[in-house]
Structure formats: structure tokens, C-alpha cells
Image (cartoon, rainbow, N blue to C red):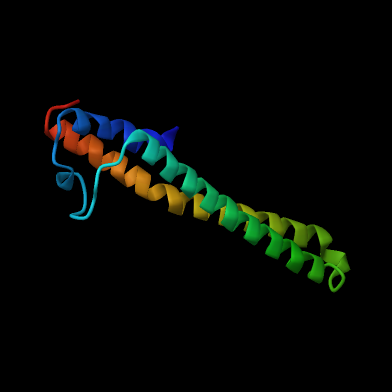
Amino acid sequence: MQLSCDLNTSMCFWFQALDTTVLGDRDDTAIGRAAGNRQILADAITVLRLSTVNNLSERVIERWLMPRYPNHRKLLHAIGWIERSAMASYWSYRESAGHLRQWQKNVRLAQQLGYH
């Protein structure tokens, strides 16, 4: 829901037929709700793909280390869990940051133009 805030705040610009080049970069073009939802889904799939690769590689490394350090199984599990959580958080933040910035730009511009 939060990632769609940039789409929701863009709607007032659509209704006012505001030139979309004012909203962002020179190369920006306005997209509809369906296209925005597809972009959000694509970002989510990217995070899922990256997390899956990271989780599998971390598990392989963990299983490789277990026989070498049998007295530190809990520590290796904890480090693996922390690493997987940190990477998932990083990729989620990285993918959502653009949506958050666009939402904040939309809100500021809408307030400046008197739409909100």
C-alpha cells in the first residue's frame, strides 16, 4: 500500500492536466495506475529474486562451515539469519526509495500548487 502513495498523489496532477515534465526529471513520463502497479510488482519480484539467491548462497556457505566448526552451530545460524535479514531489508529499502521520493515530491508540489 505504501509504495502506491506516489501513484495516489500523482492523480491530482493528472486531473489538472499538468505538464508531467514539472513533476520530475526531463525524461519522466506520466504512467497510469495499472502501469504503476506493474512497476511496484516488478520491484517486489526483484527483491524476491535477489533474496532467494542470497538465501540459497548463504545456506550453502553455512552448510559448508558447519562441519568445520561443529561447536559453533548456533553462532553460524545466528550470523546467517542476521545476514539474510539485513540483505532483505537493504534490497527492499533500495527498491522502495524511488517510490518514497516521488511521493514526497508529489505532495510538496501539490501543496505549492494548492491541490491539497
- Residue 51 place in picture, x, y as percent: 60, 55
Q: Is residue 107 left or right of residue 74?
A: left
- Residue 19 place in picture, x, y as percent: 13, 41
Q: Is residue 48 above or below residue 56?
A: above
Return the residue nearer the eye: 13 or 114: 13
Q: Which residue is at the far top? A: 116
Quarter of the image where one finds residue 23: top left
Q: Which residue is at the far bottom? A: 68
Return the residue nearer the eye: 10 or 106: 10
Q: Is residue 29 above or below residue 77?
A: above
- Residue 39 place in picture, x, y as percent: 42, 45
Q: Is residue 25 left or right of residue 62?
A: left
Return the residue nearer the eye: 67 or 18: 18
Quarter of the image where one finds residue 62: bottom right
Residue, x 30% and y 41% (percent of image)?
Answer: 31
Residue, x 35% and y 34% (percent of image)?
Answer: 33
Q: Is residue 74 above or below residue 3?
A: below
